Image: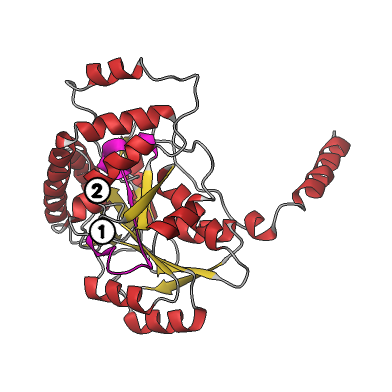
Amino acid sequence: MYGLINKGLIVSEKLLKWIRPEIRELSAYHVPDASGLVKLDAMENPYRLPEGLLPRWQQGLASVALNRYPDPAATELQHRLIEVMQVPQGRSIVLGNGSDELIQMLALAVASKQRCIMSFEPGFVMYSMIARFAGMEYVGVPLAEDFTLDMEKTRAAIEQHQPAVIFIAYPNNPTGNLFDADAVEEIIRIAPGLVVVDEAYHPFAQTSFMPRLNDYDQLLVMRTVSKMGLAGLRLGLLCGDRELINEINKVRLPYNINVLTQYTAGFILDNAGFLDGQAEMIRADREQLLSQLSLFEDIEVYPSQANFILFRVRQGNATEVFTSLCKDGVLIKNLDKPGPLQGCLRVTVGTTAENQAFIQALEHALHS
């Protein structure tokens, strides 16, 4: 038996030598099991489709040709998204299987050993991961202590590294704050390459660089329908200069938006009024949750313009608090590791009942 195990290890090493070292050094993106828990860890909209829409949606699904490949460009859906997202006239979009695929498409389109991708830390982990997938250097510019942009460090990093792409999450994930718009605009002006303003949480921030697309050819705006309540569809869009989008589109895999997603997204967008109402409820519940969290002396709460809230456990036992929450049936995101987020946890804004379950569990975790 030992010989078989040893032989297996030798064979594995022979195979794994073909995997790039930078890939072997990475850890796979981890999604925890939320079975049986109040799920407040992934910035999802907690509300489902209205009951009145379900029969019409299901009836339409019956007409979808599952035996045929989808429209490769998702043309009808593109037109609808351009209208709903108010993409400026003369600008184009490309669709991705979620924002992650769009980030990957953009990285592949600009990839070179001599080039880097830049963003801000702490920030969305997929910017750095995908840069490494594409064989590029990643430069993370540290945010200030209050998680705002440190423009002195930003200017110096841009001058030194000359990034091919700069990603700016607006609002930022996982901190939840909106960066100063004038600072973002300065970055767009001085950037040598492309600047992507990632507006995944636009429904909750209600401010956008989309209207500025015609002012800057190097600006791209990225959106997703995930936070609107359609996370299960995995649909994102990248908007910008027509010629630039055409080049990025060349690395898009064929038929990346399946027929069920194309039909469902189009149906929802044609009946999108309820989404605005849900976003309004989430914004109101966010303010209520911020107010409740501010009453806890044991935590520091950070401002948020997204559908989640970051807070720091002052006593330095954030992981113990996270574990206690899980035992009480509430799953949030544990960000507690050495660095600027040490002692931090992040909670998604849920339904009123879910939020209260979290508050009760948090009180128990902090005072038990």
**Residue 10 location (% of width, % of height):** 84, 46
| Residue 277 vs residue 97, the one in the foreground | 97
Q: Amino acid at mark 1?
A: Met
Q: What mark, if any, has residue 210 been given in the picture?
A: 1
Residue interval drawn in magenta: 211-234
**Residue at 55% in and 57% down:** 108
Q: Residues within 10 Å of mark 2 (few under 14, many from 20)?
A: few
**Residue 25 location (% of width, % of height):** 63, 58
**Residue 127 location (% of width, % of height):** 46, 59
Magenta run includes residue 40: no
| Residue 228 vs residue 107, the one in the foreground | 107
Say if mark 1 contacts mark 2, CB within 8 Å.
yes
Q: Is residue 262 above or below residue 276?
A: above
Q: Is residue 202 visible?
A: yes
Q: How is the image coloured?
A: secondary structure
Residue bearing mark 2: 85
Q: Is residue 318 left or right of residue 33?
A: left
**Residue at 57% in and 60% down:** 132
Q: Is residue 317 above or below residue 284?
A: below
Q: Is residue 100 above or below residue 123?
A: above
Q: Quadrant of residue 171?
A: bottom left
Mark 1 lies on a secondary structure that is helix
Q: Is residue 103 visible?
A: no
Q: Is residue 120 left or right of residue 29?
A: left
Counting residues from the start of the chain, the first of labels 1 and 2 encountered is 2
Instruction: State which quarter of the image contains the N terminus.
Output: top right
